[in-house]
Amino acid sequence: MDKDRIHGAVDQAKGSAKEKLGKTLGDQKLRTEGAADKVKGKVESAVGGANIATTSKVFAGGKVRQSAGLFRLGHSEAAS
């Protein structure tokens, strides 16, 4: 896992806890903060997933390429 997906999972868990606590205490502000943290976490996880999907595409002839702003190594460089 990359750091975006890890941070996303942490933010989602934190948001879920805040939402539940806010619901239990009747604190609408805390519930709203929790919902916002969950959305932030989902976005971070999606960004991390997109980065992984982009970097795991088929490489061209073992050469270093750049796609969507991410550098990728071909098979020959990755094996060394």
Image: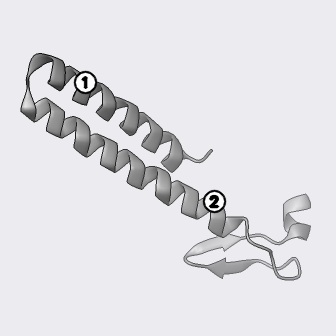
Dot 1 or dot 2, earlier in sequence:
1
Badge 2 element: helix
Q: Which mark is residue 20?
A: 1
For label 1, count other residues whose C-alpha is less than 10 Å away and answer few (under 14), some (14-19) or many (20+).
Answer: some
Q: Amino acid at mark 1?
A: Lys
Q: Which mark is residue 56?
A: none
Q: Amino acid at mark 2?
A: Ile
Badge 1 element: helix
Q: Residue 41 is drawn in which quadrant? A: top left
User: In percent of the image, x 68 and y 66: which residue is there?
Assistant: 55
State the image coordinates of residue 33 (x, y, percent, origin top left): 18, 38
**Residue 74 shows in the view:** yes
State the image coordinates of residue 12 (x, y, percent, origin top left): 38, 38
In space, the residues marked 1 and 2 are separated at their CA atoms by 32 Å
Q: Which mark is residue 52?
A: 2
User: Is 66 on the left-hand or right-hand side of 34?
Assistant: right
State the image coordinates of residue 36 (x, y, percent, origin top left): 24, 45
Above or below, comparing residue 52 to residue 14 in the picture: below
